[in-house]
Image: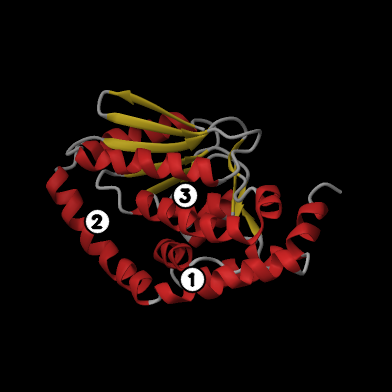
C-alpha cells in the first residue's frame, strides 16, 4: 500500500491502494510507520505522491459501512495520526498531488510543507457525506489556507487546481512536469540547513499542535457524528450516489 524509494537524500513515498488510493486502516498504519521512521534522519527531504491517476480519493467508505461503529472508532484516530505524522515530519515534505485529492487525501496534502498539483480536483466534501472532520484535520487545513478553511469545509466543494492555488491549498500548479518540479523542490529544501529548517517548522507548527491538543476532546463528538451518519444511512446514500 505504501512504496518507499530513497535516492540521494530524497525519499519518495507513494500511496498505492486500489484504483484511487483510498484510505483504510492498513494504508494509514503503513503511512504513519514510514513517516515515523524518518525521525532518525537529520538531512534530506520527502516527496509524498500517489500511484496512478489519483493522489487519494480519501476514506474507503465501503470499509466504514462494512466495519461499523467499531471500525470508525479505530479508523478516525488512525487518520488523525497519519495527518500529524506527515505534518510533524522533521524533514521537508513536498506533496506531489498527481490527481484528485479528496477528503482525507486533501488533508494529507495540506499537511505537507509544499503542495504541488498537476491535475484533478481537491477538497473536503465531508459535509456532503454528512460527517464532521477530525480536529487534527481541521487545524492542519486551517494552517494551510487560513480563513478559507471555513468555506472549503462548509461548501463541501471539490475545487480546481487553479482555484486551490488561489486559496493557498496548492503552493504551485505543475500540469506538465509535476514529478520533476517536486524533485527539484525537494532537492532545494534538502539543501537548507537541517537545524534551521527543523527549528522554523517547529515554531510555525507549535500553535497548530496546541490547538489540536486543546480541542482533542471534540474528537469524541466527531466519532459520534460518523456513527450517526452510518446508522441513518447518509454514508451509504453518498456512496451510492458516486456510482450513478
Residue bearing the label numbered 2: 201
Query: At 43% from the left edge and 76% from the top edge, which residue is drawn?
Result: 217
Q: Position of residue 177 (x, y in %)?
A: 49, 30
Query: At 64% from the left edge and 38% from the top edge, which residue is drawn?
Result: 20
Q: Is residue 83 left or right of residue 123?
A: left
Q: Is 114 placed above or below 7 here?
A: below
Residue 83 can be seen in this image: yes
Alpha carbon of mark 1 to alpha carbon of mark 2: how far?
25 Å
Disc 3 secondary structure class: helix
Q: Position of residue 106 (x, y in %)?
A: 53, 53
Residue bearing the label numbered 3: 109
Q: Position of residue 48 (x, y in %)?
A: 43, 39
Per the rendering, the mark at residue 219 is 1
Alpha carbon of mark 2 to alpha carbon of mark 3: how far?
16 Å
Pointer 3 with pointer 1, Cβ within 8 A: no
Q: Is 93 placed above or below 177 here?
A: below
Q: Is 194 placed above or below 74 here?
A: above
Instruction: List the single residue furthest toward the right.
Output: 244
Relative depth, front residue between 178 and 26: 26
Q: Quadrant of residue 153?
A: bottom right
Q: Is residue 132 left or right of residue 65?
A: left
Disc 2 secondary structure class: helix
> Which badge, 3 or 1, comes first in the chain's sequence?
3
Q: Quadrant of residue 18?
A: top right
Residue 113 can be seen in this image: no
> Which badge, 2 or 3, comes first in the chain's sequence?
3
Amino acid at each position: 500500500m505504501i512504496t518507499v524509494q530513497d535516492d540521494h537524500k530524497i525519499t519518495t513515498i507513494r500511496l498505492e491502494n486500489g484504483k484511487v488510493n483510498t484510505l483504510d486502516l492498513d494504508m494509514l498504519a503503513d503511512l504513519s510507520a514510514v513517516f515515523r521512521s524518518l525521525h532518525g534522519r537529520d538531512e534530506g527531504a520527502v516527496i509524498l505522491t500517489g500511484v496512478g491517476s489519483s493522489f487519494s480519493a480519501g476514506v474507503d467508505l465501503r470499509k466504514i459501512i462494512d466495519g461499523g461503529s467499531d471500525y470508525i472508532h479505530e479508523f478516525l484516530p488512525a487518520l488523525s495520526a497519519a495527518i500529524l505524522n506527515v505534518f510533524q515530519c522533521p524533514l521537508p515534505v513536498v506533496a506531489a498531488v498527481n490527481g484528485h485529492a479528496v477528503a482525507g487525501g486533501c488533508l494529507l496534502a495540506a499537511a505537507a510543507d509544499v503542495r504541488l498539483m498537476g491535475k484533478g480536483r481537491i477538497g473536503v466534501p465531508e459535509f456532503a457525506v454528512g460527517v464532521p472532520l477530525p480536529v487534527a484535520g481541521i487545524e492542519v487545513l486551517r494552517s494551510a489556507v487560513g480563513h478559507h478553511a471555513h468555506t472549503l469545509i462548509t461548501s463541501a466543494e471539490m475545487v480546481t487546481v487553479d482555484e486551490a492555488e488561489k486559496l493557498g491549498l496548492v503552493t504551485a500548479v505543475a500540469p506538465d512536469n509535476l514529478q520533476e518540479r517536486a524533485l527539484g523542490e525537494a532537492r532545494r529544501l534538502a539543501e537548507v540547513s537541517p537545524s534551521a529548517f527543523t527549528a522554523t517548522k517547529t515554531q510555525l507548527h507549535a500553535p497548530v499542535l496546541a490547538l489540536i491538543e486543546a480541542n482533542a476532546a471534540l474528537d469524541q463528538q466527531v466519532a459520534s457524528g460518523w456513527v450517526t451518519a452510518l446508522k441513518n444511512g447518509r454514508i451509504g446514500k453518498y456512496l451510492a450516489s458516486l456510482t450513478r
